[in-house]
Image (cartoon, rainbow, N blue to C red):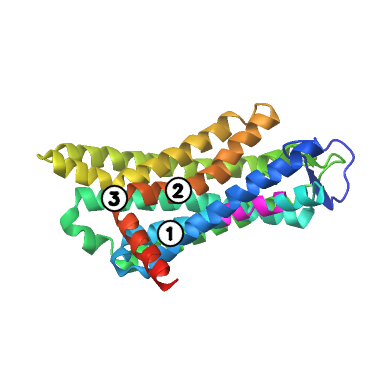
Amino acid sequence: METGNQTQVSYFILLGFSQDSENQPILFCIFLSMYLITVLGNLIIILTITSDSYLHMPMYFLLSNLSLADICFTSTTIPKMLVNIQTQSKVITYAGCITQMCFFNIFGVMDTLLLTLMAYDRFVAICHPLHYTLIMDAHLCSLLVLISWFISTTYSLTQSLLTLRLSFCTNWEISHFYCELAQALTIACSDTLINHILIYMGTTLFVIVPFSGILCSYIRIVSSILRIPSTHGKYKAFSTCGSHLSTVSLFYGTGLGVYLSSDAPSWRNMIASVMYTVVTPMLNPFIYSLRNRDIKRALQKVLGRKLYVL
């Protein structure tokens, strides 16, 4: 489609949540608080895992990478939004918008891949416990995480390069609080067919396939747990994957909300995106610290040591 007046775009306007200046301080305080809680909570999880040798296991190695990805995922959108609120500006440069899209895709895809690896880890631990240390060794875990980073980065860079070839009309307004790729494509004047094809491929490869893998893993896990004779054994086995199951439900539940609200009014779409990009990373540390006994024990040890020093 080659319609409209095309020009060299130098910036976009992020319309954000509210046009009312009276609401801006409230929004600033809410999102600043959520961002600080997200960063602090996930940093505590990373530091706890790295400082406790008992947690140097595949499951917690993957969890520390998930916490790192969550920090970066939230940091791609919220700091810029806070700056815009504080300066009462809605402008983001063209380069800044493409960069934000790129990193948003990297860490979003990384989250789905890490959650899938964590599901596989729980599958091996519960369904093949005698072979767990042989299958999920440190070398394999590190290799799988590196491959995941490579895949997510390659996909994101490809999508970003395809976006760079697009031309835009005189309407440079994006009805969101960050540079969302789908919203940016709606204001492009040039043909976006290849971009949409890549989005559909990415949705299949990085959403549907990982979710199917997680679902299959938990079907096998539940089947194995039901064969355990004792109630205590069933509870112990399920408790090892309860935190991950809660995180998966939250991540894909909010992600589904974003998808279903894509054709809804912009404010509903933005609220769903906040749940997906901010609330989920913020709640993950609480889910693991409250539902996982090993994390709780390590946190108590670390916090007790700090308090003793003080």
Q: Earlier in the sequence, mark 1 or mark 3?
A: 1
Q: Earlier in the sequence, mark 2 or mark 1?
A: 1
Q: Mark 2 — residue?
A: 284
Q: Which residue is mark 1?
A: 45
CB atoms of marks 2 and 1 within 8 Å? yes
Identify the element where label 2 is drawn.
Answer: helix
Q: Is residue 119 visible?
A: yes
Determine the secondary structure under disc 3. Answer: helix
Towards the viewer: 196 or 285: 285
- Percent across and percent down for residue 263 are 65, 27
Going from the N terminus, do you reach mark 3 or mark 2 first? Answer: 3
State whether residue 217 is above or below residue 148.
above
Q: Which residues are magenta?
A: 72-81
**Residue 80 as seen in the image, left or right of residue 289:** right
Q: Compute the Cα span from label 1 to label 3.
A: 19 Å
Rate crowding at label 3 as few (under 14), some (14 to 19) or many (20 or more) other CA atoms within 10 Å.
Answer: many
- Where is residue 160 shown, x and y percent of the image? 67, 53
Query: Which residue in the protein does label 3 denote?
Result: 122
What secondary structure is found at the residue carrying circle 1? helix
Label 3 is placed on what type of residue? Arg
Q: Quadrant of the N terminus?
A: top right
Residue situated in front as seen by the camera: 19 or 201: 19
Q: Which mark is residue 244?
A: none
